[in-house]
């Protein structure tokens, strides 16, 4: 089987390629990347050693797909993954749309021409922000929990946010481009007769992730704590009680192998993929973990709430378990320890991934 991974030199793309080749050495993997993200070049050498063939290209450019070989499946791991993209001073809204939406169209056109299957790695940020902000939460210890006795909106329970939760805007420019890409992907697959799977992923984390405050928060926090960089709890009382769940990208491999197996059929085309409640942690709890691992460090508080911030988001992955018999394999502590070891071995990792 031949697979093309778009965005292969990013953290998720490179982790998938390495893990998949380890579990299935006979696989042929091609990689497409534009190498615009600081640090992405570092992954090329390791992947080349594993036999990955690279194509330097930008998914925003339709002509960059003209020389690509025919493959059986395309995994879309290429995106600007920041919820602040397009609304801050570092990226433009037009560039975000071109990358996250027009890039998807170019990939889908490639799949249409070659009859290749398409797997989109989407995001939990397609879910509506307003009802998530309005949900009542209360601190239990140093982490927010959903308050008992309230009437939850459809698609929300103590297990987390399910696929039935609202996707009505506002969901951020980032979330809207991914949601629009999901719809287009499903339409392309239905119209032109090639398989499409949508995996809505929660926060990804693991060794080698390029840490920034708006992307790779677990890697950013652990690396910053180790090197005593300034850290700030932003919004919701400035205490760091906000909760997210995390997932190691390599835990996607059993799912991807099932989705790309010949003859795989399912009426369910879209599922949530995340760590769930077992992998949920607040920033304050992450700070406690870091303090035990590296020693004390001061974190300041800022009461201002940033646009698109939410207090609690955990992925309910019940449908993925039901449809694909999938669940995360790497325990939360193992993910954090892996990041910590990598941070100790690479003391300049944050500088490598910073935007100049």
Image (cartoon, grey):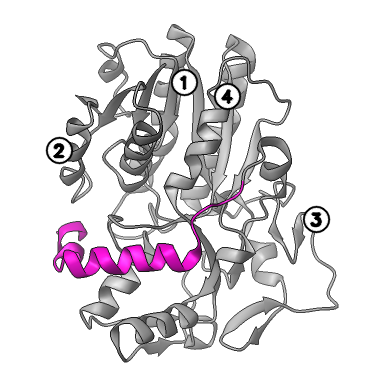
In this rendering, the answer to whether 147 lies above or below 186 is below
Crowd class of label 4 (few under 14; some 14 to 19; many from 20; radius 10 Å): many
**Apparent side of residue 54 relative to residue 82 in the rendered image (left or right):** left
* Pointer 4 or 3: first along the chain: 3
Describe residue 340's horizontal placement relative to residue 43 as left or right: right
According to the picture, the residue beneath numbered tag 3 turns out to be 154
Q: Quadrant of the C terminus?
A: bottom left
> What residue did someone put label 4 on?
196
The residue labelled by disc 1 is 108
Q: Is residue 347 magenta?
A: yes
Range shown magenta: 327-356
Q: CA distance from mark 3 to mark 1?
A: 31 Å
- Res 177 visible: no
Q: What SS does tag 2 mark?
A: helix
Which of these two is toward me, 26 or 278?
A: 26
Alpha carbon distance from label 1 to label 2: 28 Å
Check whether the beta carbons of the residues at disc 4 and disc 3 lie within 8 A of each other.
Answer: no
Q: Which circle, 1 or 4, is nearer the viewer?
A: 4
Q: Main SS of the magenta segment? A: helix
Q: CA distance from mark 1 to mark 4?
A: 10 Å
Give the CA distance from mark 2 to mark 4. 31 Å
Numbered disc in front, either 2 or 4: 2
Which residue is label 2 attached to? Answer: 45
- At which x and y percent is residue 318? 72, 49
23 or 316, which is in the foreground?
A: 23
Seen in the picture, residue 1 relative to 301 is either above or below; the reply is: above
């Amino acid at each position: 089987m031949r697979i093309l991974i778009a965005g292969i030199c990013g953290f998720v793309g490179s982790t998938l390629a390495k893990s998949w080749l380890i579990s299935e050495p006979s696989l042929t993997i091609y990689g497409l990347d534009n190498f615009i993200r600081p640090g992405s070049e570092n992954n090329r050498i390791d992947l080349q050693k594993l036999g990955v063939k690279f194509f330097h290209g930008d998914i925003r450019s339709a002509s960059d797909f003209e020389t690509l070989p025919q493959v059986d499946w395309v995994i879309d791991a290429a995106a600007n993954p920041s919820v602040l993209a397009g609304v801050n001073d570092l990226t433009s809204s037009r560039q975000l749309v071109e990358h996250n939406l027009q890039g998807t169209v170019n990939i889908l056109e490639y799949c249409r021409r070659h009859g290749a299957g398409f797997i989109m790695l989407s995001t939990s940020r397609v879910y509506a922000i307003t009802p998530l902000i309005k949900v009542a939460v209360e601190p239990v210890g140093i982490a927010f929990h959903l308050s008992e006795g309230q009437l939850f909106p459809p698609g929300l329970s103590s297990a987390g946010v399910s696929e039935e939760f609202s996707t009505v805007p506002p969901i951020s420019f980032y979330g809207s481009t991914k949601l629009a890409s999901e719809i287009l992907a499903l339409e392309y697959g239905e119209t032109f007769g090639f398989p499409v799977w949508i995996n809505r992923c929660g926060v990804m984390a693991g060794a080698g992730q390029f840490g920034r405050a708006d992307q790779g928060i677990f890697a950013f926090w652990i690396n910053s704590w180790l090197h005593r960089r300034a850290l700030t709890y932003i919004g919701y009382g400035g205490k760091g009680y906000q909760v997210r769940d995390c997932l190691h990208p390599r835990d996607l491999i059993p799912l991807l192998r099932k989705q790309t197996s010949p003859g795989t059929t399912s009426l369910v085309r879209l599922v949530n993929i995340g760590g769930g409640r077992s992998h949920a942690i607040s920033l304050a709890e992450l700070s406690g973990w870091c303090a035990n691992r590296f020693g004390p460090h001061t974190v300041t508080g800022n009461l201002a709430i940033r646009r698109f911030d939410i207090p609690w988001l955990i992925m309910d992955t019940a449908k993925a378990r039901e449809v694909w018999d999938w669940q995360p394999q790497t325990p939360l502590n193992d993910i954090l320890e892996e990041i910590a070891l990598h941070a100790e071995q690479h003391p300049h990792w944050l500088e490598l991934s910073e935007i100049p």
